[in-house]
Image (tube, helix red, strand yellow):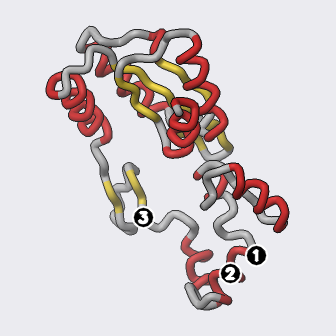
Amino acid sequence: NGYDDKWMVEAEKRGLSNLRSTPDAIEHFLDEKNIQLYVNNKVFSEKEIDFLRSLSFAIVFVNSNQHNYEFDQVQVDFDRGQEQMVSYLLDQKRYTGLGYIGGIYDGANGRIGTHRLAAIRRILEERGQYDPRTFHVGEISRESGYALAKKAVEDHTLAEAVLLGSDEVAEGALEAFR
């Protein structure tokens, strides 16, 4: 299933890579062995793969400011979505404290996780609800999520409700909470 320790042992036994984060996996999407997987399983033909390569990996731009409209674009209002999420948790569900466990990825192609972290912090500050003791930030990985959650519990710095910054971090945090 790719998530539990049994799979990690099995993947290593089979000689398979077990990339633990989305950013790490994306970097290998067009590796030759993966391309052959797409071709051999008739997901894409060799001609389609060549065409995709010629276009680049990013065909649809998400939250990009492309004004020439040559490519499809999706603009997501993450800040508004996070404002609604915080409002729901504090105003409707009546949680008294909201914390964060998440990660930052620093790679050659940019940083991931900083915008979400800054937006949640800003929203909570505006509402007078930000407590830096309940914000726990590491890497975007299952291992980091586990370590951050475990430490938050041990240090008694876990908020009543916790926002988890990514799927990978959530897997580790939920395992620590068990």
- Disc 1, SS: helix
Residue type at mark 2 is Leu
Q: Are marks 2 and 3 in contact (CB under 8 Å)?
A: no
Q: Is residue 111 visible?
A: no
**Rendered residue at 70%/74% (across/down):** 34
Horizontally, is 145 left or right of 135 in the view?
Answer: right
Whole-number angstrom distance, CA of label 2 to CA of label 3: 23 Å
- Which class describes the residues within 10 Å of circle 2: few (<14), some (14-19), or many (20+)? few
Q: Is residue 26 positioned above or below 156 on the image?
A: below
Q: Which mark identifies residue 51?
A: none
Horizontally, is 48 left or right of 39 in the view?
Answer: left
Q: Is residue 42 positioned above or below 84 on the image?
A: below
Q: Are marks 2 and 1 in contact (CB under 8 Å)?
A: yes
**Residue at the spot of label 3:** 60
**Residue at the spot of label 2:** 37
**Residue at the spot of label 1:** 33
Mark in front: 2 vs 3? 2
Horizontally, is 46 left or right of 96 in the view?
Answer: right
- Disc 3, SS: loop
Whole-number angstrom distance, CA of label 3 to CA of label 1: 24 Å
Horizontally, is 6 left or right of 104 in the view?
Answer: right
**Rendered residue at 30%/12% (across/down):** 129
Q: Position of residue 150 (x, y in %)?
A: 59, 23
Mark in front: 3 vs 1? 1
Q: In this orientation, which residue lies closer to the viewer: 47 or 25?
A: 25
Q: In this orientation, which residue lies closer to the viewer: 83 or 50?
A: 83
Residue 82 position by quadrant: top left
Q: Are marks 3 and 1 in contact (CB under 8 Å)?
A: no
